[in-house]
Image: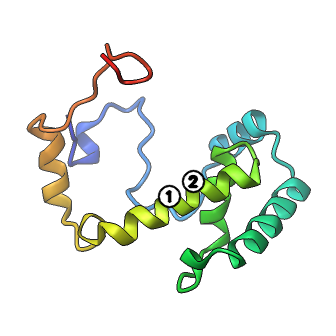
Amino acid sequence: MLVKKIEDLSDETEVLPFEVGHLPERFQQEVLNKTNETPDRKLKGLQKLKQLMKTEKIFDDTEFDEDFLVLFLRSEDYDVLCALERLKNAVALKKSHVEMFSDQVYENIAITFTKNIATFLPYRCPDGVQ
């Protein structure tokens, strides 16, 4: 259930604000452990990704923040070609369905979860067949 007030949560739960603006220390350490990220690997991955993006027409009118691009690199364990494909898919989705990504009101999104309109399916096959 969606909790609107921080006071309604138990004291043992760490609550982060809706917009953090930085990656908390414990998550930074988890990233290092899972992706073997190093400053050099991050820099090289970003440079190669930006270079490949210049050759793709879909990115011509869009400028990306480096932290945003790092999300795609991390999700593909710094496989730059896979990260590029994932980024292209995300941009294509956003361009083809603008209404899904703009002018969203928090209350409309919150009611989706509080009224169980959107649910997770824990007993589905990983490939989504059943």
The residue lying toward the viewer, choosing from 87 and 102, is 87
Q: Where the C terminus falls, by quadrant? A: top left
Q: Which residue position holds label 2?
A: 86
The residue lying toward the viewer, choosing from 8 and 71, is 71
Q: Where the N terminus falls, by quadrant? A: top left
Residue under the image location 87 percent in, 62 percent down: 44
Q: Classify 42 as above or below 36.
A: below
Q: Classify 105 as above or below 128.
A: below
Q: Secondary structure at mark 1?
A: helix
**In this rendering, would 8 be left or right of 71?**
left
Q: Quadrant of residue 41?
A: bottom right
Residue under the image location 55 percent in, 62 percent down: 88
Q: Is residue 3 visible?
A: yes
Would you say the residues marked 2 and 1 are in contact, meaning their CB atoms lie under 8 Å apart? yes
Identify the amino acid type marked 1. Asn
Using the numbered discs, state the Cα–Cα distance from disc 2 to disc 1 in whole angstroms. Answer: 5 Å
Kindly identify which numbered label has been placed on residue 89: 1
- In the rendered image, residue 7, in percent from the top left (x then y), is placed at 26, 43
Q: Residue furthest bottom?
A: 61
Q: Quadrant of residue 71?
A: bottom right
Number of residues whose C-alpha sits closer than 10 Å to that of mark 1, classed few (under 14), some (14–19) or many (20 or more): few
- In the rendered image, residue 31, in percent from the top left (x then y), is placed at 70, 42
Number of residues whose C-alpha sits closer than 10 Å to that of mark 2, classed few (under 14), some (14–19) or many (20 or more): some
Q: Classify 1 as above or below 7.
A: above
The residue lying toward the viewer, choosing from 120 and 11, is 120
Residue under the image location 67 percent in, 44 percent down: 76
Q: Classify 58 as above or below 112.
A: below
